[in-house]
Image (cartoon, rainbow, N blue to C red):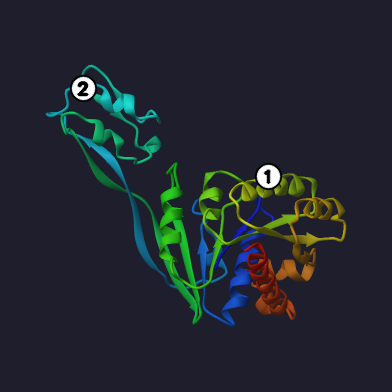
Amino acid sequence: MQIVIASGKGGTGKSTVAANLAWSRAQAAPVTLVDCDVEEPNLHLFFPGGHTDTPVTRLVPAFDSERCTRCGDCGRFCRFGAIAVLKDRVLFFPEICHSCGGCALVCPNAAITERPISLGRIEERHPLPDLRLISGVMNEGEAVGIPVIQAAKEAAAGDATVILDSSPGTACPVIETVKGSDVCVLVTEATPFGLHDLKLAAEVVSSLGVPACVVINRSCGDEDETEAFCREQGLPVFLRIPFSREIAAVQNRGGLISRDLPGWQTAFAGLYEQVVSRVEVQR
């Protein structure tokens, strides 16, 4: 079971929902929580402690100046513009290289090999006996985080229950996280911006063929437009988290409402059961 927690915009409480859902589930069965927001992972703030690191690398071309005749085949092949062949040298721009390896294949003189460069790392923690936290961390200045997301997902492959916390928005990192999952929980807030971006996120998830449901965070009881959209799209609302000073105080000190406030462990356990039932209904 792979459950993705996503949102169309930042600041909706996506990571809060992921952390509380994982903690609640860990009281009953083993669960793996994966932070796929590799540009700015933050789930470790809820579960501090020591960790082990595994490097993530990607392959980029290395050019042999003695073999290279500057024929230009590699530059013409690269659709991303990472290689420019001049009369007297080859320019390579690793920031926009997608590590496809095609330039080495088309080189007629075997002048291109591949070398690994660091892209980031995978941090692994075990904050609870039945909770495993995997965080993808991309190096500062890197432009492409997809390989780090893939490595984080691979680290959790085979685990019985995996909760994936995606990055906000609807761009490539979100698609990479949602792809292949069983269900997606869309976290939103009842504001015009929240509804606008919920619509975008729902469209992306639907295009990927992944069933979805909704959690409304900071609910004030005035989410009629959000609920109307969810009804139109067949998106069940499984949980509402109220706009509460008490809840905000727990979150501001890095706490978990499922652990620190009465009733919320049961609420998130119920969310998990409803999410699982959503998958079974779709199947």
Q: Is residue 21 left or right of residue 177?
A: right
Q: Which residue is mark 2?
A: 70
Picture quadrant where residue 164 is located: bottom right
Find residue 64 and report its horizontal and vertical position in percent. 16, 33
Q: Residues within 10 Å of mark 2 (few under 14, many from 20)?
A: some
Q: Is residue 256 left or right of residue 104?
A: right
Find residue 147 and report its horizontal and vertical position in percent. 41, 50
Q: Please report the residue visible at 69 percent of the width from the left and 70 percent of the height from the top.
A: 274
Specify the amino acid type for callout 2.
Answer: Arg
Specify the amino acid type for callout 1.
Answer: Leu
Q: Residues within 10 Å of mark 1 (few under 14, many from 20)?
A: some
Numbered circle sitting on residue 200: 1
Q: Please report the residue visible at 21 percent of the width from the left and 22 percent of the height from the top.
A: 70
Numbered circle sitting on residue 102: none
Q: Is residue 180 left or right of residue 105?
A: right
Find residue 243 and report its horizontal and vertical position in percent. 80, 63
Relative to the observer, which residue lies in front, 117 or 175? 175
Considering only order in the chain, which callout, 2 or 1, is on the residue closer to the N terminus?
2
Relative to the observer, which residue lies in front, 123 or 209? 209
Q: Is residue 195 above or below residue 43?
A: above
Residue lying furthest left in this view?
A: 66
Residue lying furthest front in this view?
A: 283
Q: Quadrant of the C terminus?
A: bottom right
Find residue 233 and report its horizontal and vertical position in percent. 75, 51
